[in-house]
Amino acid sequence: MIWNPSEGIDIGFFTVRYYSLMFVIAFGLGWYIMKKIFNRENEPIEKLDTLFIWTVVATLLGARLGHVIFYQPEYFIKHPMEILLPFRFEPQFEFTGFQGLASHGAAVGIIITMYFYSKNVIKRPILWVLDRVVIPVSCGAIFVRIGNFFNSEIYGHVTSGDPFYAVKFIREEAFWESHNLKYITGATNANDGYNLIQHDPKFTEVLSQIPYRHPAQLYEAGLYVFVFLILFFLYWRTKAAEKQGLIFGYFLILLWSVRFVVEYVKDSQGGIEESLKLFTTGQWLSIPFILVGIYYLFMAEKPIQE
């Protein structure tokens, strides 16, 4: 499969990027799922609006800072303006969107935010909140990874073109770090250049040099579907929600175990793995979450008093 999607949906005066659209879908479905949960728990919808706003801010801010801290601290120390602005200033000014978002940072941001939400808004124990909010979070993770696939980022290791699942990412960053797209094609626009590489017979040789890779984003998204379904089942069809911390524990174990396993076929993202070589950065960061999940799996046997 050759993968060279457009940046998004052109509506004339504006292009809706697929990555941004996936975030909109994720947050929209999250709000809908939490509305059902709030109705079941007899909580006012006004408190859900606050939860929604806080979660959006916590997710984006936590994910961005997580990427800066865990994956590219040296780069952002030299380019601090790019931390919270969707632009690249060197070697030339360019609108990039927020291309560096770390799920581990988002998780930390959400957990911290839920603490303040539980104390100041809903007046429930934080584990009560976390047991419920992780259900839409696991659903949202599916669409974030689909967004990564559209962005041709966080792809997998190189593989042969024989397997049906192998994908040639025309826009993959690793290849174009050592090749000049505008020089090769003569196109002034990057999108035009990528399309020429894919369709113009003159660039068949260049196209053949772009490797086939594992679509790690889709592997992860597919496995997250099962995580979501398991958590959804636990809340709606069992009494797991009566044991505070139990669903949260399952979430931490399941979601971060998926991340740990998929990392084995994922291309290096850099970070601490350069010095701690036993695991990738994503795996090292997933281990604490899994251990905390195991802790809550056992401690949830005794309901925590409000």
Image (tube, rainbow, N blue to C red):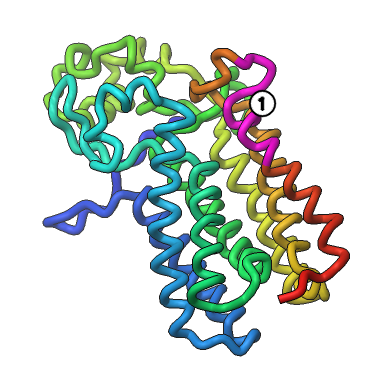
Please state, as top left, top right, bottom left or bottom right, where the C terminus lies in the image: bottom right
Q: Residue at x 65, y 55 (%)?
A: 225
Residue 262 in the image, given as x and y percentages of width and height: 65, 34
**Above or below — where is 264 with respect to 49?**
above
Observer-nearest of 250 and 180: 250
Crowd rating for badge 1 (residues with CA inside 10 Å; few <14, some 14–19, many 20+): some
Q: Which residues are magenta?
A: 276-288
Query: Can you say whether 184 is above or below 140 in the image?
Result: above
What's the residue at 26%, 31% (across, down)? Answer: 80
Q: Which residue is mark 1?
A: 264
Q: Relative to 40, is 191 on the left or the right?
A: left
Vertical relation: 202 (above or below) 260: above
**How many numbered marks appear?**
1
Q: Is residue 242 magenta?
A: no
Residue sitting nearer the eye, 299 or 20: 299
- Expressed as whole percent of the image width and height from the top left, the position of residue 291 reads 75, 42
Three-letter residue code for mark 1: Tyr
In this rendering, position of residue 159 left or right of residue 75: right
Q: Residue at x 37, y 48 (%)?
A: 19
Specify the quadrant of the image occupied by residue 263: top right
Image x and y of residue 118, in percent: 56, 70
